[in-house]
Image (cartoon, rainbow, N blue to C red):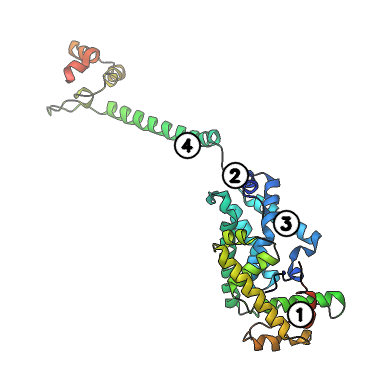
Amino acid sequence: MPEQAHIGALIDRVRSGEPEAFTALVRSYLRPAYSVALAIVGRPADAQDVAQEALLKAFQRIGDCREPSSFGGWLMQIVRNEGRNWLRSRRLRDVSSEEPKGELPSQGPAADQGVLRRELLGALQTLTEAQREVVLLHDLEGWTHQEIAQALGLSETMSRQHLFQARRKLRALLGAHTGLGAGAGAVAGEREGQTSSPEAAPSSELVSRGLGGTP
Amino acid sequence: MRDDKIDFSALDPSRDAEGWEERVQEVARMALARHRPRAALPEQLVAWLRPAMVLAAALALLVWGAALGGLGRSEPAQTGQVPRSEAPGAEPALLVARWAAEDARPTPMELLRVLGGQDERN
């Protein structure tokens, strides 16, 4: 997360319409916005669209953000609202939450990545929304608990607790299915009571690669 | 408790660095296109100046038209009413304008009123 003073200066430059400032602010916040969006909508492609739309809305309303130090939290609230609206419209369209399988290659490293991705997404679905937000911002974005707490309106203690529980659940889930293959997602999802989450297929492969202990 | 991070790199959209950079640039471009910078104070004043001038001109025209309309009216005939231009509070300028328009010769009383009208009104 960029420093507050830096963000303040960037916001001033954005307000005056400086193109480089737009790019810098997007570069700083598109990924965190994606993480929060992914925690809500559950699909990477949708999360990218939600994050993009939320950022565009934030830029349009940048005059409403009076405190640059609260920009992160203000933006994340827009992302959450956008994500929830997206979910509602998706439910209305009655579209399956399953990602298109046709995009995934059937063999090779790309296929492995696809499987890994599905397994991670499925495992994430077993968490609460707050746990997903915290674990993605912390472990994917590298934000500190202080930054997460500020952005999500939590206490640092709560952020730590969510991270602890999220990791424990993910490890328990993924570790419990050692030996399951790539096609076992539905089984894993059903075991966790997540029948609507067809992407839940944690495996030993994921445990060895995905949870292998990034320091 | 194991404190090591969970590896979410498979979900990281910036793994494709080139594609991600393109997306960043695209979002910034769209945001810039939708952005309308707030005008500086002098620009805001200039923006207000034109409508203010138009409004002032319209008001001036309205007053001028009303004055002309008042001059064009015929004198009230034997009604005992005091002509509007001569009523207490009437502008001396209107009296002068009426004399000019009607080619009328002012009475000494009227002249006095125009020259020192404040006294009489009060």
On screen, A11 above or below A57? above
Relative image position of residue A139 (x, y in whole percent):
70, 66
Distance between the alpha carbons at the discs numbered 1 and 4: 60 Å
Q: A3 or B95: nearer the eye?
A: A3
Pointer 3: what residue?
A: B24
Distance between the alpha carbons at the discs numbered 4 and 3: 41 Å
Q: Name the image quarter holding the C terminus of chain A.
A: bottom right
On screen, A118 above or below B29? below
Pointer 4: what residue?
A: B51
Q: Residue furthest front?
A: B1
Name the residue at 70% across, 89% down.
Answer: A187
The numbered mark, 2 or 4, whose residue comes first in the sequence reads 2
Pointer 2: what residue?
A: B37
Residue type at the position of mark 4: Pro
Q: Same chain, marks 2 and 4?
A: yes
Residue type at the position of mark 3: Val
Name the mark nearer the viewer: 2 or 4.
Answer: 2
Is disc 1 surrounded by few (<14), some (14 to 19) or many (20+) residues within 10 Å?
A: few
Label for residue A101? 1
Distance between the alpha carbons at the discs numbered 3 and 1: 26 Å
Name the residue at 71% across, 46% down.
Answer: A20
The numbered mark, 4 or 3, whose residue comes first in the sequence reads 3
Residue at disc 2, secondary structure: loop
Q: Which chain carries label 2?
A: B
Residue type at the position of mark 1: Lys
Distance between the alpha carbons at the discs numbered 1 and 2: 44 Å
On screen, B110 above or below A65? above
Q: Same chain, marks 3 and 1?
A: no
